[in-house]
Image (tube, grey):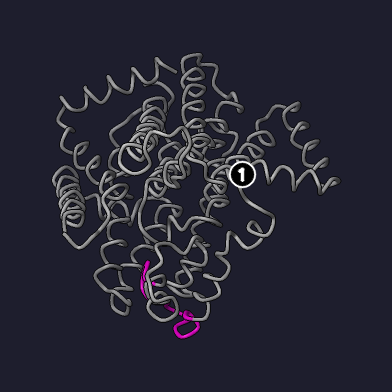
Amino acid sequence: MIGLLKDIFGGIITVLKSKYKLIFILFALWIYRIDFIPEDGSGIGKAIQIVSLFGLLAILYRKSPNLFSFSYQQTPIQIRSLLWLYSFAVISTLWAFIPSFAFFLAFQNLVMIMLWIWIMSLFRTFKQMEKLFIIVCICVAVFESIGARAVAFGFSPFIHFLPGASTGALTFSYCVGEYLSNKCKDRDRRGFLMASMIISLIVMITSTSSGANASAVGALGIALLFSGNLFLSFVFIGISLTLYLNPNLVESLMMWLMPGKTMESINTASGRTVLWELIKIKTAERPLIGWGFACIERAIGTEFLGETTSDAHSNFVGMYGSLGIIGLLLFVFHLGVHTLNAFKNRVKLGYLGILCATICAIVNSYSYGFLSGKTCSITIVYFGLVVLSYYYSNIKYYE
């Protein structure tokens, strides 16, 4: 694990001395802004976000002028469906409750998807590509874990920081899926996956998100079931049957995964079901197109609550409220084709990890609107997974 952290630190120094240093700096500024600088009216946070985002866009255009047409025309359906979704989100600016807000957040997601498409096109081997993806995830998760304590919470062992916990959960899910599948006998890769699992697990546990914990356990179950190892598959089936026949054990497990929760708070998603009902009531006024991307929380805050809520705490409810039935159908279609693609290719190197992390993201969608609202670190990790599902299909392990 120490070796991995040293490699990451050395890699950062190398990037800062390379021609890609400006991309790294702008991306780091963007992550810092969305995690730790609230929009308090001073305009500082907004200025940093705009400069970093459009700086990245300018670099992408200069380095790959055809990236836009390539992304929309030549990528597979799992990527194009994601682009269609956020293109519709950009169009929702025309009827959005807060037009500038809807446009910027939707456009931001399109830029981040294309950033992943361009970055992954630079690599020629599976090993390089996977390593970069995991290192980016680990860097972001550790940065958030340390930054949240330094900026907001103090250096307590345990804090409640949803972005860091969710990023840790997705990274853990990918790594555990690939580690248990054991499709490649490369000792260096297995050591790298194990070290990454440990670091991401530490970040997830110390960030204390019940939803992230539960989603990671779900991904672990998928990894056991489809690992290709009969013993592990039987272990999963045995555990599942035991839990099915003993409902009290299920409740005890949920209490362990969600410390501080009660069954009532779990059943009502910590009271979020009240928020979801308000979203459904408001969206009934515009059922087909919603209130504009990421705007439903602002709309119900103005009418029902007297204050703005930051997150619908559900990708599905958030998509329905913001983009209506059309947007929700696009979202479900994307999840379906992406999950099916990962499932069909699960016997190939890299794809069981993608499947596990995708299941983790879908489960986490119940408690975190990371695709239907403000972009955060788990949003970026998810976009990376979708892009990897394309590049893994036609690349060699070594040069």
In this view, the residue farthest toward the right is 245
Q: Amino acid at mark 1?
A: Pro
> Is 291 a magenta residue?
yes
Q: Quadrant of the C terminus?
A: top left
> Where is mark 1, residue-wise?
259
Hey, which residue is sitting farthest bottom in the picture? 285
Q: Is residue 206 left or right of residue 65?
A: right
In the rendered image, residue 349, in percent from the top left (x then y), is placed at: 52, 30
- The location of residue 244, given as percent across then percent down, is 81, 47
Decide if residue 238 is on the left or right side of residue 45. right
Looking at the rendered image, the quarter that the N terminus falls into is top left
Query: From the viewer's perspective, is 245 left or right of 316?
Result: right
First to last magenta residue range: 282-295
Q: Which secondary structure dominates the residues rendered in magenta?
A: loop
Q: Position of residue 41 (x, y in %)?
A: 20, 63
Q: Which x, y percent locates residue 98?
A: 29, 74
Q: Is residue 355 above or below residue 194?
A: below
Query: Which residue shows up at 18% across the image and 55% down it?
Result: 50
Q: Is residue 244 magenta?
A: no
SS at mark 1 in the image: loop
Residue positioned 18% across, 33% down in the render = 20
Residue 118 sits in which quadrant? top left
Residue 4 or 333: which is nearer the viewer? 4
Q: What residue is rendered at 37% in x and 66% in y?
A: 294
Q: Is residue 10 above or below residue 304?
A: above
> Which quadrant of the view contains residue 229?
top right
Q: Residues within 10 Å of mark 1 (few under 14, many from 20)?
A: few
Question: How many numbered marks have been drawn onto this rendered protein structure?
Answer: 1
